[in-house]
Image (tube, rainbow, N blue to C red):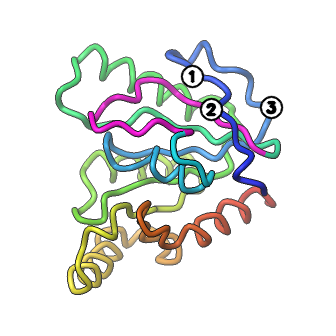
Amino acid sequence: MKYEKAEFKSAYGTFEQLPQSDLPEITFAGRSNVGKSSLLNKLFMRKNLARVSSVPGKTITINFYGVDGVNFVDLPGYGYAKVSRSEKQRWAKMMEEYFNSDRNIKLVVQLIDMRHPPTNDDIMMMEFLESTGIDFVVVMTKSDKLNKGDYKKRLKKSKEELSFVDSDYIIPFSSQTGENIDKIKAVIESHLEE
């Protein structure tokens, strides 16, 4: 797959606006400010295709990127406290409709900040994916922000905290160093072949 050929397709603020799911979808989910845009930019080998924001809760739309007949779908971040209740409800409704509709979701890339234990929202999201039978991989972002000792501890602890996830599908990642970007691509591509 020629990731570097990725293009921004469009952004949608409500589920009703989404186009039909006629292409395979690789979906990116995670808390606000966990690094979804940074991962997408690293994946696509571009600096600013996905807009990176220093303000959590900035992505309030479902953003579609296309490459080689595959849609990469960036979902709004969840769990950010400083967003109004009505906005949170709108997001929750949009996410629920997205996952419960008959979309061609091949894989969800679930992002978690490696420096911290998964939040209740993270666990709820993964349990939901498991209950619906949607395949997912856990990408632990910001791995470069940990020293060697803390990195090892967090990796071991994460595998305990996420004992219901196949440990091969718990992947540390750094948008700074590109750690494991090839492994993430391999997981994506293996799910597109199924």
Towards the viewer: 121 or 64:
64
Amino acid type shown at disc 3:
Asp
Task: State if disc 1 and disc 2 touch (CB < 8 Å).
Answer: yes
Report the residue marked by disc 2: 64
Report the residue marked by disc 3: 22
Q: Is residue 88 above or below residue 171?
A: above
Q: Report the residue at 59% width, 13% height from top.
A: 16
Amino acid type shown at disc 2:
Phe
Q: Picture coordinates of residue 24 (x, y %)?
A: 75, 43
Residue 11 numbered tag: 1
Residue count near mark 3 (Cα–Cα under 10 Å), binned few <14, some 14–19, many ≥20: few
Give the spatial CA distance, label 2 vs label 3.
13 Å
50 displayed left or right of 149:
right
Q: Which residues are magenta?
A: 49-67
Q: Report the residue at 59% width, 38% height from top.
A: 73
In primary-sequence order, the first of circles 2 and 3 is 3
* Element type at mark 2: strand
Amino acid type shown at disc 1:
Ala
Q: Picture coordinates of residue 78 (x, y %)?
A: 33, 36
Give the spatial CA distance, label 1 vs label 3.
17 Å
Q: Is residue 53 above or below residue 82?
A: below
